[in-house]
Image (cartoon, grey):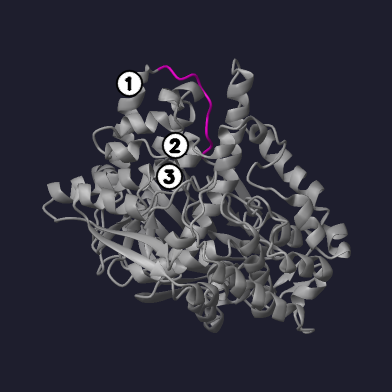
Amino acid sequence: MCGIAGWIDWETDLARQRPVLEAMGKTLAPRGPDDEGFWFSSRAAFAHRRLVVVDPAGGAQPMIRRRGDNQYVLVYNGELYNTPDLRSQLEARGHAFKGHSDTEVLLVSYIEWGERCVERLNGIFAFAVWDEAEQTLFMARDRLGVKPLFYFSRGNRLVFGSELKTLLAHPEIRPEIDAGGLAEALIMCPARTPGHGVFRGVDEVKPGYCLRYDHNGIHWRRYWKLVSKPHEDSLDITVEKTRALFQDAVKRQLVADVPVCALLSGGIDSSAITSCADEVFKLAGQGPIHTYSIDYLDNERYFKPSIFQPNSDSRWAQLVSDHIGTVHHNIIVDTPELVDSLAMAVRARDLPGMADVDSSLLLFCREIKKKATVALSGECADEIFGGYPWFHKREAQNTGTFPWVRMVNERTRMLAPEIAEIIRPAEYLDRRYRETLEDVPRLPGDTPLEARVRELLYLTVNWFMATLLDRKDRMSMAVGLEARVPFCDHRLMEYVWNIPWEMKNVDGMEKGIFRRAMAGIVPGEVLGRRKSPYPKTHNPAYTRAVRSRLERILKDSSSPLLRLINVPKVREMLASDGAAITKPFFGQLMTGPQLFAYLLQVDAWLREYNVTIC
C-alpha cells in the first residue's frame, strides 16, 4: 500500500516543479512511511510514498520500464491478488521480471495489454501510468473503490492524488466549497456521492472506472459493473461455490513479506476470515494467526442492547479465538483519548466523518500497527449478502430514500436557515437517490420484492459500503496499516449479487447462505449469532465530554461552525443530551453523542483546512 500523486501540464515545464511535488508527497507520508520517490519530465511529474508489503528491494516507485524506444512510468497504490497468474501469462508472452512485486507485474500488464489490463486485475488499486512517447496519462481505480483516487482538471492541466489533502497541497487548488460541497459535508456526510470530491473543482475516479488524459482532454470508460442474470445453481451448489470463492479470496489476500493479522469481533464475518486465514497459516507452517478486537473502558457496565446492537462483542471474540487457537489482543479505548482523536480522524479523512466510530478505528489501527503491517477485515459481507436491518423490515424497505439516512428533518432544523435554503437537503438527498436507482442493473422477471431488494443492495453497495471502505482506508493508512477486505473480491461479489433473496436468507436467517457455507469452519454458536455492528462506546462520560466541548464552541464567536448552524436549536439539543435523536441519524451507531461529535469534527475541519464557502 502506498500514496500516489501526479501533475500533467501541457504548458508548464514540470521538470522545474519539484517543490510542489515534494509538498504533495509529504501529505502522503503516513500512507507510505517506508520510502519516497519522484519522477519528472517536461509534461508529467509523479510523487510516491511507499509502505513496504511485498518485495522490499524490487518494488520501489515511481517504476519505469522501457519497451523499444518508449518509456512508461507507473505510480500505484494497492495490492494485486492474482499476481502469480498474471506473471505466468506475461512470461509466456516473452516478458522477464527483475523482482517479485505486484507493482512490476502491473506495469508490464499495462505495457502488454494497454488500457484493457484493468479487466484482468484482481485486487484493490488506484494507479496512474504515463506514456512518454504518446504523451498520455492512464488512471484506474479498483472495481469496488477500496483504494481512493481524486483529481483536479482545469485548462491544460490535471492533478491527481490518493487524498484530498494531497491536491490541496498544489498551489492552484483551494479549499473552497459551493452549495454542492456544503450538501455533501452537512447532509450526505459521512457518506459521499460517488465521484464527488466536496471541494470545488475536485472530482473522484469512481469505482470500476478508468480514464485517459491527453491533449484532447479526459476520456472516461466504465470497465466494470454488476450484471443481473438468472441464478441457475441449486442451493447445495450455491453453498459450495460461495464457500470456495470466499476461501480463495482469503487465501489470496494473505500474501505479504510482512506480518499479517486479522480483525476479530466475534461476528460471523470476521470469524470466517480468521478461521480460513488460520487454516492457511497452519498449512504453511506459520503458526497461529494474531487477532485483534476493540472495546471501550467500562462498556460492559453501560451497554444497552438495541435493535442495531443486540449484544457486545468481547466474549464472542474470545470464544472464537479460543476455538481456533489465535494469539488474541483486545485493545481497550478510554473516553479522553477517544474525544481527543476526533480531530485526528478529520485529518485522516480530510472531511468530517463518523465521529468516534472513526476515531476509535484510528486508535485501534495505531495499536495494531505496532506488531503488524497487514490486517484482514470483515467489511462488506452485510452489503453483498443483505445483512442489515433495512433489508428485512418492511418499513425500511419502503422509505423511498437511503434507508440508513434518518432524522433528515431534525438535521435540517439544526442548520442555519440560510444554509438550509442553499442546500435544500431533502431535494439534494432525493436527487442522489434517484440517480442511483437509474443505474440499478434490473432483471426482467423479478418479483416486486426481488426488484426492491436488488435496489436496496445496489444502493448499499454504492453508498453505505463505499462509506465503510473509505473509513477503513483512511483510518488504517493514516498509521501505515494496510487493511484488506476479502468480501470485496469482485468474483464473490458478482456471484452473490445474483443469488435469489429467498436463497440468501435460507433457514430464515439473514445471510443464511453464508452461514451454511461456513458450517464446520466457524463455531456453531457464532453461526447463530445475530448481526452486531462495529462497537461504539456507551459510557455517559463520552456524551458529557463532547457536549462540553460543543458548548465551548458555541460560545466562541470566532468559530466558523456558527455561520452554518442554527445555534439556538443546537443549544436545545445539548440541553436534552441529544434526546431528540431517537434513532441513529446515520447507519446503525450514530445517535445523539455522535451528532455532537460530528459537529466538533465539522468545526475542526473548517478551521484546520481553512475552508472557504463560496
Which is nearer the N-term, disc 2 or disc 3? Answer: 3
In the picture provided, is 392 more to the left or to the right than 92? right
Q: Main secondary structure of the magenta part?
A: loop
The amino acid type, in three-letter code, at marker 3 is Cys
In the picture provided, is 340 more to the left or to the right than 396? left
Would you call the spot at circle 3 few (<14 residues within 10 Å), some (14-19), or many (20 or more)?
many
- Name the secondary structure under disc 1: helix
Q: What residue sits right under mark 1 in the picture?
A: 237
- Name the secondary structure under disc 2: helix
The amino acid type, in three-letter code, at marker 2 is Met
Residue 535 position in % (x across, y down): 46, 56
| In magenta segment, residue 231 | yes
Residue 311 position in % (x across, y down): 44, 48
Which residue is depicted at the point 27% across and 40% down?
A: 523
Q: CB atoms at circles 2 and 3 under 8 Å apart?
A: yes
Quadrant of the rendered image containing residue 602: bottom right
Mark-to-mark CA distance, 3 and 1:
21 Å
Which is nearer the N-term, disc 2 or disc 1? Answer: 1
Task: Identify the magenta region.
Answer: 224-232
- Name the secondary structure under disc 3: helix
Find residue 488 and name its label: 3
Mark-to-mark CA distance, 2 and 1:
16 Å
Q: What residue sits right under mark 2 in the picture?
A: 493
